[in-house]
């Protein structure tokens, strides 16, 4: 079905170690992303039984060469010199219709040489969560790994309690992480480090090869992509939950969703992950953590860079500090779009800061606020605008008088920049629906009872995030107090 190549497998061990999937008892296909498969070059799609065998790992896909990837990582600030794919196998790479090389990986397919005593399996819940959230992110244009398939294994996985097992197949620009570079660097294997860096330059940043110092150019390019990625996370209230260096993609994609969640009631210090006891990865901390991760990446590149001593440290430090400027530039653009302002508006940042303060103090739902603001902005173009949309927005806050004052300030700026392009940009920046925690949990609970219809219904709407249909509006509604899900869990 797919035409596999294996360039990463040519890198020295233990960056890649051959390994095989552990067969499962009774694989059944839950979901398969046929449009993505065609995008990856598939000519035809086999039947569901064959797909279940392939994407559970029970039968090798033609041309696949399974292997586990080695990497290290700072986990909640503590360095672990060897982590690696303890439950994942890279099947190989494909070149898609746009000429882009992409990895195909099984996740939850059994033990590998990096399992460290684990079972190498995944519970069903995290598989469904990653499928839904990664496909929503793709629909929003946020760089992300993609979901190709989900297969139930017919086996139980024991975490806190026995749970149904599943295997997830994801597609990525690559699975190379900051932790991959740390893995080579901690071994003081400069040849492996250089081979890895050259591979990344050729695959992801070919323009860096022409730089005066290709490895400094690589650092600058990775910093730029991470800045854009984090700004886009923040714009939709996404909280990754476990931003360890082994979960930081060199390609600038969202990877390893784990205990991720979307913020509902706006709170800069919001945390959902059950394992983030110290709030290290709270919503507002994400830019600083990304910059910290990039500093660890820079440290690994120092032996390869042209300058030496204090000069090379100064170069790397300057590259890391530039993250702030790049992040601010992307955030300013996103703020303008979300508020329906002209891109050059000097009011975008202060108005956004004011609205975030209002959302926090007024206990407002972030997604619902921007959706309501989008509808109100559209109504302002009418000759006699109705109060309906303004009142709907004010109904979202516990402090309507304060929000009214903000609205008056925003409206004076917004009306001055109105045009059809602004409305389109505003709508495309403000989704109607996100994968809300309580909806994802409803899907998981139903699937544990053998009912996957709610999963497919939610998937259909979150992959059309601007849909105004009745179904979308129903599933877009914020959680009531009794429905709230305040903790998310990692599947390892």
Image (cartoon, rainbow, N blue to C red):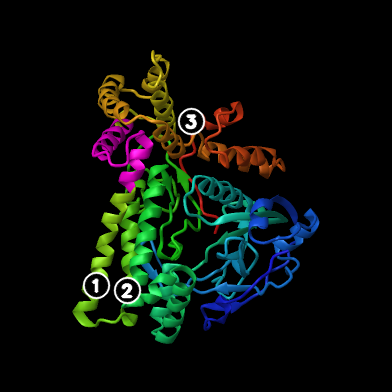
Q: Are marks 3 and 1 in contact (CB under 8 Å)?
A: no
For the residue labelled by badge 3, is the local secondary structure a helix, a strand or a loop? loop
Q: Residue at x 49, y 31 (%)?
A: 479
Position of residue 332 relative to residue 313, above or below, is above
Q: Which residue is mark 2?
A: 216
**Residue 478 badge:** 3
**Residue 283 badge:** none
Q: Tag 1 or tag 2, which sits nearer the N-term? A: 2
83 or 464, nearer to the observer:
464
Whether residue 357 appears in magenta in the rendering, the answer is yes
Label 2 Cα neighbours within 10 Å, binned few <14 / some 14-19 / many ≥20: many
Image quarter hosting the N terminus: bottom right
Q: In whole angstroms, how far apart are the C-alphas of marks 2 and 1? A: 8 Å
Q: Residue at x 56, y 33 (%)?
A: 467
Residue 457 appears in the figure = yes
Q: Are marks 2 and 3 in contact (CB under 8 Å)?
A: no
For the residue labelled by badge 2, is the local secondary structure a helix, a strand or a loop? helix
Q: Tag 1 or tag 3, which sits nearer the N-term? A: 1
Q: Which residue is mark 1?
A: 315
278 or 250, nearer to the observer:
250
Range of magenta residues = 331-360
Q: Residue furthest left?
A: 310
């Amino acid at each position: 079905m797919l035409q596999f190549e294996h360039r990463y497998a040519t890198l020295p061990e233990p960056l890649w170690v051959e390994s095989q999937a552990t067969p499962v008892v009774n694989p059944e296909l839950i979901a398969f992303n046929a449009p993505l498969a065609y995008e990856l070059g598939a000519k035809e799609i086999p039947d569901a039984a064959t797909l279940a065998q392939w994407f559970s790992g029970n039968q090798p896909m033609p041309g696949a060469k399974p292997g586990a990837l080695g990497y290290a990582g700072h986990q909640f600030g503590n360095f672990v010199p060897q982590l690696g794919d303890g439950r994942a196998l890279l099947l190989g790479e494909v070149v898609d219709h746009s000429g882009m090389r992409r990895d195909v990986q099984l996740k939850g397919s059994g033990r590998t040489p990096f399992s460290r005593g684990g079972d190498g399996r995944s519970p069903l819940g995290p598989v469904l969560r990653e499928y839904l959230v990664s496909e929503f992110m793709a629909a929003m244009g946020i760089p992300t790994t993609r979901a190709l398939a989900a297969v139930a294994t017919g086996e139980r996985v024991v975490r806190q309690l026995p749970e149904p097992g599943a295997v997830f197949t994801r597609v990525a620009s690559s699975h190379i992480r900051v932790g991959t570079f740390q893995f080579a660097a901690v071994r003081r294997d400069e040849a492996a480090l250089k081979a890895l860096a050259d591979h990344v330059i050729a695959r992801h940043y070919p323009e860096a090869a022409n730089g005066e110092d290709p490895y400094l150019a690589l650092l600058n390019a990775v910093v730029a992509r991470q800045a854009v990625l984090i700004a886009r996370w923040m714009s939709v209230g996404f909280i990754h939950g476990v931003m360890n260096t082994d979960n930081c993609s060199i390609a600038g994609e969202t990877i390893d969703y784990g205990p991720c969640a979307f913020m509902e009631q706006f709170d800069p210090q919001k945390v959902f992950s059950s394992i983030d006891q110290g709030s290290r990865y709270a919503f507002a901390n994400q830019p600083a953590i990304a910059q910290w991760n990039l500093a660890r990446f820079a440290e690994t590149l120092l032996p390869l860079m042209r300058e030496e001593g204090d000069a090379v440290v100064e170069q790397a430090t300057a590259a890391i500090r530039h993250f702030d400027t790049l992040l601010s530039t992307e955030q300013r653009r996103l703020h303008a779009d979300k508020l329906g302002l002209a891109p050059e508006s000097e009011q975008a940042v202060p108005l956004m800061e004011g609205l975030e303060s209002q959302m926090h103090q007024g206990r407002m739902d972030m997604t619902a606020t921007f959706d309501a603001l989008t509808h109100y902005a559209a109504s302002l173009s009418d000759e006699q605008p109705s109060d309906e949309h303004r009142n709907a927005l004010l109904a979202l806050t516990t402090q309507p008088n304060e929000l009214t004052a903000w609205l008056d300030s925003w409206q004076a700026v917004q009306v001055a920049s109105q045009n059809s392009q602004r409305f389109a940009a505003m709508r495309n920046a403000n989704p109607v629906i996100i994968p809300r925690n309580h909806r994802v949990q409803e899907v998981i609970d139903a699937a544990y009872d053998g009912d996957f219809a709610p999963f497919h219904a939610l998937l259909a709407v979150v992959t059309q995030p601007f849909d105004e249909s009745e179904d979308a509006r129903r599933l877009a509604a914020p959680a009531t107090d009794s429905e709230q899900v305040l903790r998310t869990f990692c599947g390892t």
